[in-house]
Image (cartoon, grey):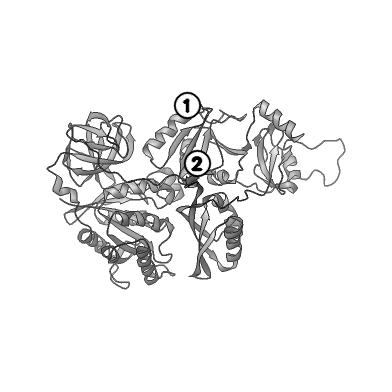
């Protein structure tokens, strides 16, 4: 059967996974009347809840005698480690762009990787049936983006289609027939080249592992594209690391090929096809799986370095061990090392004491997803504020810079620019009207300045602004950036919070807890209205007497407490604070000092 391998690239919420749903339906991958969940490719619980693609996944459809392997890539730059590996498996890319928004930062990130590999793109202008769609403007912006990214003449001469993924149609003209996605299928078959590996099917077997997984029945599994030769069930092969070290020999116990949403066991697979192999015990991502005669590994794509780090430690609060079952440091360490093995964009190192672990990655969202997965698995841990990773170049301290793209109502433009360029030491790059009373702002801001900024940004724009960020490069250190200005309200007692006490504390600032919640000494229960921290007593009840007076026994009405998500809590805390994460709760607290350190600090303050 003729074969095509293609990846679909899009910014978050531009309709990529919805389009794949329609491709599967119209190709006949589902039987008549089969119940299929919406956004079928987003199989992970967190993906379905957040509406984003986190893990790269492959599927396969058949169209007029051609099998098309489709890879759904993450749209967020924090999960770029997935994207960089997955692009090495395909021979073409389909760039999906919202006809109203145009190309956005994550579009730029993934597209730059695809163009650098020499892949020729197909551009699909999606959501052209929206009232505010401007497909011609979006198409011009895509061309400008390709030119800025250094595309060659073949890549700039890209074919394009107008489409609506939700409605399930594509057309070569804006006002053309709106019947089905057949024009997209035909364009993929004619524009994307056949895998060049097919001509090497008589050579020894070689495959570069790009994603690692685990199956409860067949164990460790690796997915990749066969670069040469034929893989056969039962054959003995070897794994070679990216530096040429031989890791292990093993027998291929099973070969799984993508057929629709499912994977089907096959006896053999030829060069050019994307398959999953089972049987290995040590081989991992970026290793070459090959015949025993192979001596040198296949070249693998370099991964962009991490830009932030977060310290994971055991939960040592007074409420530790009540919700979770996995609380020991060795269990947390094993889980983090397992994550680093499958996700090459994460790096784990032990701290000197051995009780905490420094996890370096791409961004706050990537860390938030990892922590959320761990708490759902029953882990309890404490997490520090994200720290930016610096590096030295020619004796100069360099820090990561991010490109921030903001769409905001015209009324709030001044406040946003003042915060980015003044307080957070960013540089304004571009500012232009975005239509419908909105302005698009592009700025280069230090990663340090963006930690904890998103909540402030939503407040400044009354929740109407949209902020996207992308790693831009390294620049000389830009000087100190002030952190959170407000202090914290800290509990000075252990027990259960009382409504009367919280009501009297509302004048002091915003509360993070409600009545009848468990608190302990050192726990942050609110944000102080001033810059200093304040110890308060949330357990103090009303003094009772035997005299009743009119109006004194009315029910206390509390203001609704501020509830933070995991990412908001991590970005909110200061350097001397931690987030306590359990399967049932997210709490903020001060770092607990050992008795000697506490005594030393009290002497210094005296």
Residue 554 is tagged as none
Please give the name of the residue rendered at 23% of the width and 41% of the height, measured from the top-left corner.
207
Please give the name of the residue rendered at 14% of the width and 49% of the height, measured from the top-left corner.
199
Q: Which of 30 and 183 is in front in this view?
A: 183
In screen coordinates, is 556 left or right of 459? Answer: right
Is residue 557 visible from the viewing direction of this image?
Answer: no
**Residues at marks 2 and 1, CA–CA distance in whole angstroms:** 20 Å
Element at badge 2?
strand
Query: Residue 99 at x, y = what percent?
Result: 39, 66
Q: Nearer the viewer, residue 373 or 422?
A: 422
The residue positioned farthest toward the right in the image shown: 547
Q: Kindly indicate the quadrant of the structure image that contains residue 244.
A: top left
The residue positioned farthest toward the front in the image shown: 394
Query: Residue 159 at x, y = what percent?
Result: 27, 66
Please identify, in this view, whether the residue under mark 2 or under mark 1 is nearer the observer.
2
Is residue 243 visible from the viewing direction of this image?
Answer: yes
Q: Which of 515 and 69 is in front in this view?
A: 69
Q: Kindly indicate the quadrant of the structure image that contains residue 463.
A: bottom right
Q: Mark 2 points at which residue?
A: 309
Count how many numbered circles sit on residues in the image.
2
Residue 330 is tagged as 1
Query: Residue 556 at x, y = what percent?
Result: 74, 45
Element at badge 1?
helix
Q: Nearer the viewer, residue 548 or 386?
A: 386
Q: How crowded is mark 2: few (under 14 residues within 10 Å), some or many (20 or more)?
A: many
Q: Measured along the vertical axis of the image, is residue 370 above or below residue 474?
A: above
Q: Kindly indicate the quadrant of the structure image that contains residue 489.
A: top right
Can you say which quadrant of the picture contains the C terminus?
Answer: top right
Q: How crowded is mark 1: few (under 14 residues within 10 Å), some or many (20 or more)?
A: some
Please give the name of the residue rendered at 35% of the width and 50% of the height, measured from the top-left corner.
73
Q: Of label 2 and label 1, which has the lower sequence position?
A: 2
Query: Residue 117 at x, y = what percent?
Result: 29, 53
């Amino acid at each position: 059967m003729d074969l095509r391998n293609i990846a679909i690239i899009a910014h978050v919420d531009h309709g990529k996974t919805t389009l794949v749903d329609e491709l599967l339906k119209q190709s006949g991958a589902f039987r008549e009347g089969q119940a299929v969940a919406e956004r079928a490719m987003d199989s992970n619980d967190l993906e379905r809840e957040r509406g984003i693609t986190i893990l790269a996944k492959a599927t396969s459809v058949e169209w007029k005698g051609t099998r098309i392997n489709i890879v759904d890539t993450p749209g967020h730059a924090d999960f770029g480690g997935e994207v960089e590996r997955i692009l090495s498996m395909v021979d073409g890319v389909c760039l999906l762009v919202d006809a109203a928004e145009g190309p956005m930062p994550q579009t730029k990130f993934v597209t730059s990787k695809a163009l650098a590999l020499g892949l020729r793109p197909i551009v699909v202008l999606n959501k052209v049936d929206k009232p505010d769609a401007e497909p011609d403007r979006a198409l011009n912006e895509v061309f400008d983006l390709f030119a800025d990214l250094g595309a060659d003449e073949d890549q700039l001469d890209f074919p394009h289609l107008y489409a609506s993924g939700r409605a399930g149609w594509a057309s070569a003209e804006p006002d053309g027939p709106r019947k089905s996605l057949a024009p997209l299928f035909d364009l993929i078959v004619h524009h994307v080249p056949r895998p060049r590996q097919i001509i090497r099917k008589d050579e020894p077997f070689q495959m570069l592992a790009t994603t690692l997984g685990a199956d409860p029945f067949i164990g460790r599994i690796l997915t990749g594209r066969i670069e040469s030769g034929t893989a056969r069930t039962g054959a003995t092969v070897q794994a070679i690391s990216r530096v040429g070290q031989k890791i292990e020999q093993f027998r291929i116990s099973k070969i799984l090929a993508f057929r629709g949403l499912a994977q089907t066991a096959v006896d053999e697979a030829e060069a050019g096809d994307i398959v999953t192999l089972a049987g290995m015990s040590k081989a991992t991502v970026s290793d070459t799986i090959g015949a025993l005669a192979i001596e040198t590994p296949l070249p693998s794509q370099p991964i962009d370095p991490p830009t932030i780090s977060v310290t994971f430690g055991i939960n040592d609060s007074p409420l530790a061990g009540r919700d979770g079952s996995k609380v020991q440091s060795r269990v947390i360490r094993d889980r983090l090392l397992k994550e680093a093995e499958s996700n090459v964009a994460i790096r784990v190192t032990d701290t000197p004491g051995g009780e905490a672990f420094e996890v370096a990655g791409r961004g706050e969202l990537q860390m938030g997803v990892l922590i959320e997965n761990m708490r759902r698995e029953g882990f309890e841990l404490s997490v520090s504020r994200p720290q930016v990773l610096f590096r030295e170049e020619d004796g100069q301290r360099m820090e990561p810079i991010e490109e921030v793209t903001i769409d905001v109502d015209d009324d709030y433009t001044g406040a946003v620019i003042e915060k980015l360029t003044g307080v957070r030491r960013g540089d304004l790059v571009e500012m232009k009207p975005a239509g419908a009373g909105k302005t698009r702002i592009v700025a280069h801001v230090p990663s340090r300045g963006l930690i904890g900024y998103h909540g402030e940004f939503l407040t400044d724009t009354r929740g109407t602004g949209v902020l996207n960020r992308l790693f831009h490069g390294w620049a000389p250190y830009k000087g100190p950036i002030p952190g959170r200005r407000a202090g914290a309200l800290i509990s000075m007692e252990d027990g259960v919070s009382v409504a009367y006490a919280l009501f009297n504390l509302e004048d002091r600032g915003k509360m993070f807890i409600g009545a009848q919640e468990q608190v302990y000494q050192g726990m942050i229960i609110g944000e102080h209205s001033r810059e200093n921290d304040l110890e308060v007593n949330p357990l103090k009840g009303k003094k009772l007497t035997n005299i009743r007076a009119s109006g004194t026994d009315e029910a206390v009405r509390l203001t609704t407490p501020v509830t933070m998500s995991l990412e908001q809590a991590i970005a909110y805390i200061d350097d001397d604070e931690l987030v306590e994460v359990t399967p049932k709760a997210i709490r903020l607290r001060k770092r607990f000092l050992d008795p000697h350190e506490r005594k030393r600090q009290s002497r210094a303050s005296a």
